[in-house]
Amino acid sequence: MLFTLFAAIVLFILINMSSRFALVVLFLTPLFFIFLMPGTSIAFLSYRHMLLANGLVPINNFHILLMLWSTLIGIILYTDFLTWYLARGTKMKKGKMDNSQSAEAFGNVLQNTSSAIGKAKDALLKRN
């Protein structure tokens, strides 16, 4: 229940406020509780839920917290990258060339491509 509430708060901050603020809340909230109530926090994080592989791998609340952190960090970084990429795309659209410049640039690309194909063809024919 606490981890679900924690994830919901971080996602709410991510959507409504800022991704950087969500990262700060993501990291500082558990640290704040550890410094505020060290005994209770350590007891909560070390609570064992289950044992896997015949008792060799314990699953504690700390492992669940790490899984939650990695998932939320991935979501936050993905949204940051996506926001940057979409903002970059709108900047590129604003700086569009007019039709005469784009036609000239396309002609240069075609000319360079055809000369490269011709050179490759000559090189292959000389080899035989």
Image: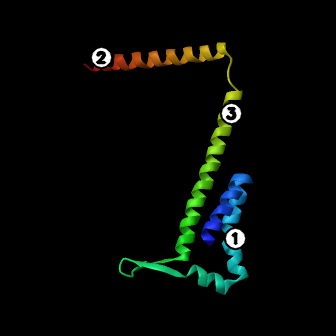
Q: Residues within 10 Å of mark 2 (few under 14, many from 20)?
A: few
* Among the 4 quarters of the image, the one containing residue 76: bottom right
Q: Amino acid at mark 2?
A: Leu
Q: Is residue 67 above or below residue 83?
A: below
Query: Which residue is at a point 57% across and 70% down the rendered structure image?
Result: 65
Query: Which residue is at a point 66% across and 43% down the rendered structure image?
Result: 84
User: Mark 2 or mark 3, which is nearer the start of the sequence?
Assistant: 3
Query: Which residue is at a point 63% across and 64% down the rendered structure image?
Result: 7
Q: Amino acid at mark 1?
A: Thr
Q: Are marks 3 and 2 in contact (CB under 8 Å)?
A: no
121 relative to 86 in the view: left or right = left
Residue at the outermost left position? 128
**SS at badge 1:** helix
* Among the 4 quarters of the image, the one containing residue 36: bottom right
- The quadrant the N terminus occupies is bottom right
Q: Is residue 31 above or below residue 88?
A: below
User: Disc 2 designates what residue?
Assistant: 125
Distance from Cα at disc 1 to Cα at disc 2: 69 Å
Distance from Cα at disc 3 to Cα at disc 2: 46 Å
Q: Is residue 2 above or below residue 37?
A: above
Q: Are marks 3 and 1 in contact (CB under 8 Å)?
A: no
Q: Residues within 10 Å of mark 3 (few under 14, many from 20)?
A: few
Whole-percent x, y for residue 109 in the image: 53, 19
User: Disc 3 designates what residue?
Assistant: 90
Whole-percent x, y for residue 39 in the image: 65, 87
User: Disc 1 designates what residue?
Assistant: 29
